[in-house]
Amino acid sequence: MKLGNRILNITGGGSDGWDVFYRARAMKAEGKPILELTIGEHDIRTHPDILNAMHASAMGGHTGYAAISGTLALRQAVADRITQRTGVPTRPNNILITPGGQSALFAAHMAVCDEGSRALFVDPYYATYPGTIRGVGAVPVPIAAHARNGFLPLASDIAAEAPGAVSLMINSPNNPTGVIYDAATLTGIAQVCRDHDLWLISDEVYDTQVWDGTHISPRSLPGMAERTLVIGSMSKSHAMTGSRIGWICAPEDVIARLVTLATHTTYGVAGFVQDAACFALAQGDAPERAVAAPFARRRQITLDLLAGQNVVRAVPPQGAMYTMLDIRAAGMTGEGFANALLDAEGIAVMPGESFGQSAAGHIRVAMTIADADYEQAVRRLLGFAATLA
Ligand code: PMP
């Protein structure tokens, strides 16, 4: 039996870029000691206080169907958080609660794209982006953000692809590069969106992991609230990856349509998970800072070790839980280096090429293992690169 083209085309037919990751997992399963710096997941678990709130809610009976749009209490808490942090007045009717940021990215493209629509996104990109766009039947169009420009997209490059496009997806703080878009970059992007009547899908799931610079939500720029869909998630901010809880913040009429979509897809998010999220948000930003702190420490470890050599160069990580390293001086592709490093040192990193052609010749290091192990891994990685150069 033949399946539908949309689902068959999600990966675009090529490799999904995770070969090194799967090889590392297989080596680990054989009992080899592997240091994994691959996946964007904390080395801590969800705080017990949040789990207690989840338990209390479930035991209290919140185990039936929950409001499909999200509970009013959680939508209010998310709206208040956004109002407070961005200055844009935001109400519960601007919020749809979703099972994680990924489903929010999919729903956002469902909301704005038609079949065959050109949907722009920035390369390097988070691995699911092109597949998410293809999944709704639209055509992914990458905008290269070059290493020589600090992986910031140029407004002129976006403008060149904008005619006939319906949307642009951006991600700051960025996975995989760790770059935070500055005010000038975002102002330029907003101008292109207004000039070409593009929807902006702004993935801000790393907004609590800012080490250098300031996170600006482009929804706060002039004329942007009416055309921006912001993607949020508690996966990274509260180490709640497994709870699958996130949101879309958008104009009220867009949210109303998205509630209809949710009625026909997810049917909402578990009520006890929403209550736990509400509890977590009520604790203010101290728990968010605590969850982010290990990455700030490991970023400093990385910068200190890099300063002691001159083969590997970093794009200075300003945010998120990753460091992008330029290994071109070692004379290899990112993929070649990642494979060789895994074989020689038992250290797994992601090849830059997994995140698009603009990240070729780079590797992405996830700062997601304990400090001492992390330091040892980066030390050995740099030592290995030095033997190649
Ligand atoms: N956007 C980016 C940039 C991500 O890195 C991730 C997860 N790694 C997501 C969205 C989705 O996260 P979740 O579905 O867990 O909220």
Image (tube, grey):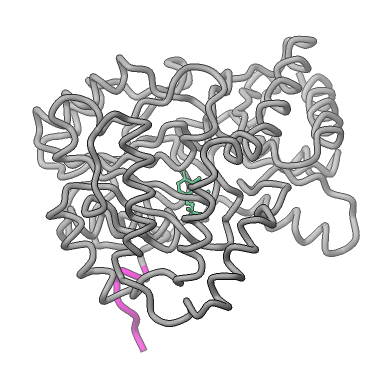
Q: Whole-percent x and y of residue 238?
A: 57, 47
Placement of 31 over or under 264, stated as above or below? above
Q: Whole-percent x and y of residue 371?
A: 81, 33
Q: Which residues are magenta?
A: 1-8
Q: Residue 153: which quarter of the image? A: top left
Say which residue appears at 70% left-offset and 35% top-offset. Answer: 337
Q: Quadrant of the N terminus?
A: bottom left
Question: Does residue 7 appear left or right of residue 112 in this picture?
Answer: right
Say which residue appears at 16% left-offset and 26% top-offset. Answer: 192
Q: Residue 56: which quarter of the image? A: bottom right
Tally of numbered discs: 0
Say which residue appears at 65% left-offset and 24% top-offset. Answer: 327
Residue 309 belongs to the span the image colors magenta? no
Question: Does residue 260 appear left or right of residue 18 in this picture?
Answer: left
Placement of 144 over or under 7, stated as above or below? above
Say which residue appears at 29% left-offset and 65% top-offset. Answer: 69
Q: Whole-percent x and y of residue 74?
A: 39, 56
Residue 2 belongs to the span the image colors magenta? yes
Seen from the viewer's position, the closer of residues 384 and 301 is: 301
Residue most extreme to the front: 60
Q: Whole-percent x and y of residue 151?
A: 44, 23
Seen from the viewer's position, the closer of residues 160 and 103 is: 103
Question: Does residue 304 appear left or right of residue 52 in this picture?
Answer: right
Seen from the viewer's position, the closer of residues 266 and 332 is: 266
Seen from the viewer's position, the closer of residues 201 and 95 is: 95
Q: Residue 186: which quarter of the image? A: top left
Q: Quadrant of the C terminus?
A: top right
